[in-house]
Image (cartoon, coloured by chain):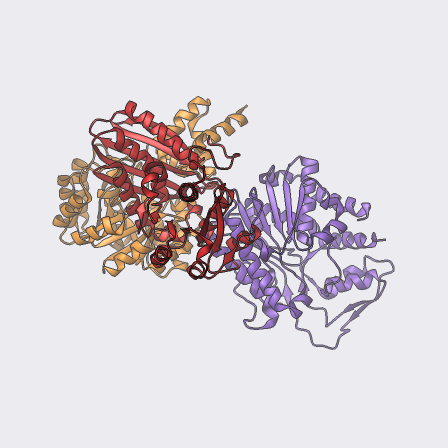
Chain colours: A purple, B orange, C red
Amino acid sequence: MDISKVTSVRKDCLEILEDHHEELSPLKGKTLVITGGTGFLGTWISEVIATLNDEYSYGTQLTLIARGTDHFKNAKKHLAERKDVHLIKSDVRNLTELPKETDWLVHAASNPDNRFHATNPIETMSAIADGTSAVLRAADRCENIKMFLNVSSGLIYGSLPLEVKAVAETYNGAPVSGSTASAYAAAKRYAETFVAAARTQAQIPCMSVRPFAFLGPYQSLETPWALNNFLHDALAGNPVRVFGDGQSVRSYLYGSDAAFWILKILTHGQSGDCYNVGSAEGVSLEQLARKIASCFDPAPEIRLKTSNTVQQVSSFVPDLSLAIKKHALEVKVSLDSALKKTIQWHQNKN
Amino acid sequence: MKSVLISDPTLRDGNHAVAHQLDREQIATYCKAVDKAGVPIVEVGHGNGIGASSLQLGESKVTDEVALTTARENLKKSKLGIHCIPGFATIKKDLQRAIDIGVDVVRVASHCTEADLTDRHISFVREKGKTVYGVLMMSHMVSPQILAEQARKMENYGAEAVIIMDSAGHYLPNDVTERVHVLLQELSIPIGFHAHNNLGVGIANSIAALEAGASILDGSARGFGAGAGNAQLEVLVAVLEKMGYSTGINLYDILDAADIAEKTLMSSVPMISSTSVVSGLAGVFSGFMKPVQRIAKEYNLDPRDVFFELGKRKIIAGQEDLIIEVAMDLAKVAK
Amino acid sequence: MKKLKVAILGSGNIGTDLLIKVMRSPVLECGAFIGRNLNSAGMAKAQSMGVQVSAESIRYIEKNPQCCDLVFDATSAKDHLFHAPILEGLGKIAIDLTPAKIGEMCVPAVNMQDCLNLKNINMVTCGGQASIPVAYAIGQTQGEVDYIEVVSSIASRSAGPATRINLDEYIHTTEEGVRKFSKAHRTKAILNLNPAQPCINMQTTILAKCASPNIEKLKPELNKIVKIIQRYVPGYELIVGPVLENSRIVVMVRVKGLGDYLPAYAGNLDIINCAAVAMSEEFAKLLTGGTFNMNKKATKNEVSTH
């Protein structure tokens, strides 16, 4: 990876940890394991842990378990080659053992790519359901485990109408049952309940977090999400195309914020807790496209309704008051700043 | 008129205060008095319930059989209740016999995270056609949601009500209100509350429980119970009367019964000692006091500081070996 | 040296932990690891160790009787009642880790020799394995023993659904075992499940009331038997006593597990497995004419007993 990219990510981590690094002290000298650890979230958590170890002598050992460790070794050498980062190549469904010394565990293994969900709903559901079950069984035999953090999804609330400006953890909505479009979200709901079952029966300390959309370096622009499409178009010097009327509302949390939130909740939450994680700064897709365009000079043209299909307008913004109240969390990187950082990172490619 | 079911653990929880030495005559005398007053449920037995008389916890002066038979003979209107903790009491050895003697109400108890231990005992009592309640002890140690989850297990096993115990005397009224609310939301059976008076709010907490929707309250004569004691029964009855609740208990008779209790059952009336305040505030098992005092002296620390740190770390009975670790950590900080 | 072939029935946590202990033994070899679900974590572990696995339950042994001479049954009491006559018919020695109680109660430190001519032996309970040797020493040295009480505390996380639902049976069996080996008039067993984090190690307190307690007489006998247990349960440790408190004898032991497949705090599960393996090793010595003996430390060397 380009050294300037490594430096810019480290700078992000230092900014997020400034004045707050002591809040993660329960990680000092402990072993953190992340399943699906080579993905966006796992990588950002790795960056934060690396920063804590280098700058604040945390002495935290990190183990990343994933199928994609080979790619990680090539693409993220600066992390893969660290002495405090250990890689285990495994499909979580086949995982029978976790490192015995595991203190903290973030279970983030699942493929968020909606193209994969559409083509492969069976595999999507199995990876989440069987994967969660296998990791919990292994965690049950870890003597020191202090918390099993299940990374669920904001999609478990089902499709949200525009009136729901911010969805709280207590919201009573769900993905449509029996619809193949629900494969990912329904499996995530199953996983949350499974984790609660393990908590009450096997007494493994467990929590869930429900991430909404994230943004930042390490996110591949390939997945056809609106944000990626816009960035992709703009970075290629093309007009930014907005399908539909652009009135759906989304929000995006920057990678360093996301990693800090997850680690803070992991180390300070109570067994049984469940928190939304994301940004409360809602933005319509049209506004998002304009914000992205304004980062470029000259600004690319915005084309609305480039597709004829009638798109359902929806909202996908979390209510964060629970996490903010209980853990004094804040979003440090604004959407504007997050977009700028992300664009710069991608422009550094060459 | 709103009504509330009063259960009186004087002859059970109070046994803690006299090292389980209540005898046949004391049981008979008190039972007669509260039976006359119309107390609906009278709990009798070793402080930790039937089957708990042991060298570890203290041996009862009289066997369960004698205690229950005596109580049965002297309770005409009042129902006879027992406390039963699986792990101490078994169905075959203890519960079956208690039911044969004529126990009406069995309160099957567990630590607040271990409700699944009560499955078979609750089922057994239910099948015998007796009234069975679930009891969650040390209920302050888990969140209201987890408490509700555990209570729901008891409901599924067939408990007719669930009683939460403030075993360490840690709650303030707001804590009780919050828990009772969540429990009522999650369960469809009545909720009860058992207070301890470490912070002087035994009655206030009981009223908070009631106003939040609880319908069973425990109270002991003169507060006779472990440590700082329970909610004081005769005061509770008076307060409830003033608030317009019906308890079915005659005020004058219960005041008389409390006087009798003071005279015949206790060597001293429960009071809130400094130790009780600290253990209540810290939410820690009061039995830690002696080892904490010894170890604090050794490390030149204030034992109260050690207690609060134990509370923060959610230390519970059985983890005595961690007191030294906590003391060492505190000593390190002090330097 | 020829090894004794054993099979393990039950691929849960207990069975899998047994497997690891068997694989480490110089005198045992695992001929089959048998359960009901080939996809379980235990099966995966067995396969990774190159052990023959089967999901056919007892049928596998019926079809392949040459796979073993001794069978550990780590299923359930109900299943063992079904397995026992079949194993007997096949001439296999059965070491029963369930609460079925068909066979003689076996505590290696106390009655190993008596059990070697039996075809079905029962490993009592975890609390029994921890407390019976102490109760036995009390019975041997104190003359008339009126009462023995054993109180065990185990980590809540180490008590699975089977332990929880069988709590009463645990108490009754432990009381029976303590009575049988100590000759005390009355016995009482208590089990506490402790949900504390970090998890506590298993602790057992043994309290005894005797007509004329004699601590000095008890000490050498107790030390002797503790040393014998430590040969097969390295994490067994005397932490209090014997002392006299209020004219009662008090002894407290702690059992730290080996941490083979189960976490180290699950000393309660480890001790019963260690005892079962110790018995099977003695059978091996007897049946294969090997030279293995109990006086040799045959367990993981990195485990400290302190």
Residue C51 position (above or below residue A84): below
Residue B297 position (above or below residue B156): above
Residue positioned most to the right: A298
Side of C201 where A90 appears, left or right: right
Q: Is residue B40 something that shows in the picture?
A: no
Side of C36 where B82 appears, left or right: left
Side of A239 where C267 appears, left or right: left
Q: Is residue B266 something that shows in the picture?
A: yes
**x and y percentages locating residue B187 in the rendered image:** 38, 59
Looking at the image, how many numbered discs can be counted on the residues? Answer: 0
**x and y percentages locating residue A184 in the rendered image:** 60, 65
**x and y percentages locating residue B154 in the rendered image:** 35, 56
**Where on the picture, by quarter, is residue C202?**
top left
Residue B312 position (above or below residue B184): above
Q: Residue at x 28, y 26 (%)?
A: C244
Q: In this view of the protein, which residue sits in the foreground, A73 or C100?
A: C100
**x and y percentages locating residue C240 in the rendered image:** 36, 29
Q: In this view of the protein, which residue sits in the foreground, B13 or C152?
A: C152
Residue A82 position (above or below residue B133): above
Q: Residue at x 16, y 46 (%)?
A: B31
Residue positioned most to the front: C289
Side of C39 where B41 appears, left or right: left
Q: In this view of the protein, which residue sits in the foreground, C121 or C151?
A: C121
**Where on the picture, by quarter, is residue B60?**
top left
Q: In this view of the protein, which residue sits in the foreground, B269 or B50?
A: B50
